[in-house]
Image: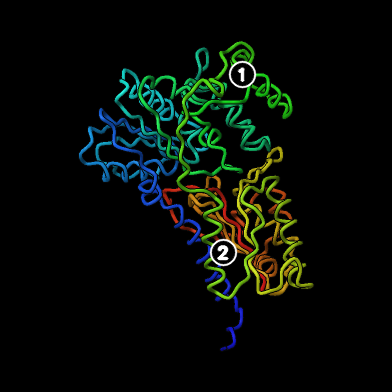
Amino acid sequence: MPESPAWTDARARRVLRLVFDAAVASAAPAPAVLRHLPAKPAGRCIVVGAGKASAAMAAAVDAAWPDVDLSGVVVTRHGHGAPAGRIEVIEAGHPVPDEMSEVAAGRILAAVRGLGPDDLVLALISGGGSALLALPAPGLSLGDKQAVNRALLASGAAIGEINTVRKHLSAIKGGRLAVAARPARVVTLAISDIPGDDPAAIASGPTLPDPSTREEARAIVARYGLALPPAVGAALRDGPETPKPGEIEVDVRLVATPKLALDAAAAVARAEGLRPLLLGDALEGESRELGTAMAGIARSVAQHGAPAAGPALLLSGGETTVTLAAGAAGRGGRNTEFLLGFAVAAAGQAGVWALAGDSDGIDGGGDAAGAVVSPDTLARGRAAGLDARASLAAHDSYGYFLALGDLVRTGPTLTNVNDIRAVLIA
């Protein structure tokens, strides 16, 4: 058997990119949607949707059902739109909703009203839909919802906590879209970006019952000490509850998930001579702290061959958080902050590389999916006059990797199965 080639920097970077691209490709919306379409309706089909993959999902439905009386409207992030035939595509703000988020939500709610029992509502849901589908509950303004989103995103709250609050401030989330569609049949096709793949949490579950309560939402606000507009407090105290389990008929089909993406990445790793070790598809917590922990595992593999013998690839998914320090003005997202924390903790460990990126192609508010760390990341940073610890403290991970030329740019991928993290130990 021929000897495996040496793990050079070029080879490691090439394989990491192959692994990341395979994970993203596994969640391509069109084939995923086509595998899970329901039977064609006797009446009309109204396609609605929200999320970073909604335009691509809608285009697949339009092409697959040319003989169906079909129309609808979906909303996706600015820059993620694509033609979808008979289905209108609206672009709106993410991660903070904008005026078009409210317009789109209103149009979607109006599209499902007045239907009959022979009609089908096909709801195409993917990550990012919570911000994109922003129709304030009665008594609230879009400005109130924007203030809530900004406060939650900066607080360090987990995505599940953020969505619990969002549902109770919305006129469309937490099952309210499904209620508006009665008596039509509602089928939900979802691409999961949620730890644990709870479909009621994807885009804050507009077509699914909501087990959370206003009391739980108030507790989250109190836990993080959030200062919110008075109208928000009133809505969480006195507003109507979301529809609960048993009150909505559920037909939901998960068409792509983080676990399937990691499985695809692992298959590529094996083909490239690596032993993949899947650490989980639902890892959460502070980004830099997870980076520190992952660096510790990588160093153990490199120095002791445990918990896996090299050459190995540590794979994980999920959604971490970044708690912004007061006055922080740096640039970056979950993945670049994870990687800078990883680089500091790995301390130049020989034979260790890492790539982390958001599968939607946009990490935070920047123009990169993520970045790559190599054994000489800190040394090259020092040579360029950078202090990795100072950049981490300032939440300027994007700036650090930009200066080194180590950002990973894919452009919008039109899908979203959350973050993909790969650590290669030669």
Which residue is pictured at 63% across the width and 64% down the height?
A: 354
Query: Badge 2: how crowded within 10 Å, few (<14), some, or many (20+)?
Result: many
Residue 35 vertical placement versus 159 (above, below): below
Looking at the rendered structure, the kind of residue marked 2 is Ala
Mark 2 vs mark 1, foreground winner is 2
Q: Is any part of residue 376 visible from this angle?
A: no
- Residue hosting label 1: 229
Residue 67 drawn at (x, y percent): 20, 39
Residue 343: % across, % down = 70, 62
Residue lying at the far left of the rendered structure: 67
Secondary structure, mark 1, is: loop
Q: Residue drawn 46% across and 36% down?
A: 252
- Callout 2 secondary element: helix
Identified at 63% across, 19% down, the residue is 214
Name the outermost residue toward the bottom: 2
Tell me the kind of residue under disc 1: Pro
Q: Quadrant of the C terminus?
A: bottom right
Mark with earlier residue (2, 1): 1
* Disc 1 crowd, CA 10 A, few/some/many (<14, 14-19, 20+): some
Q: Position of residue 25 (x, y in %)?
A: 44, 57
Q: Nearer the viewer, residue 177 or 328?
A: 177
| Residue at the spot of label 2 | 266
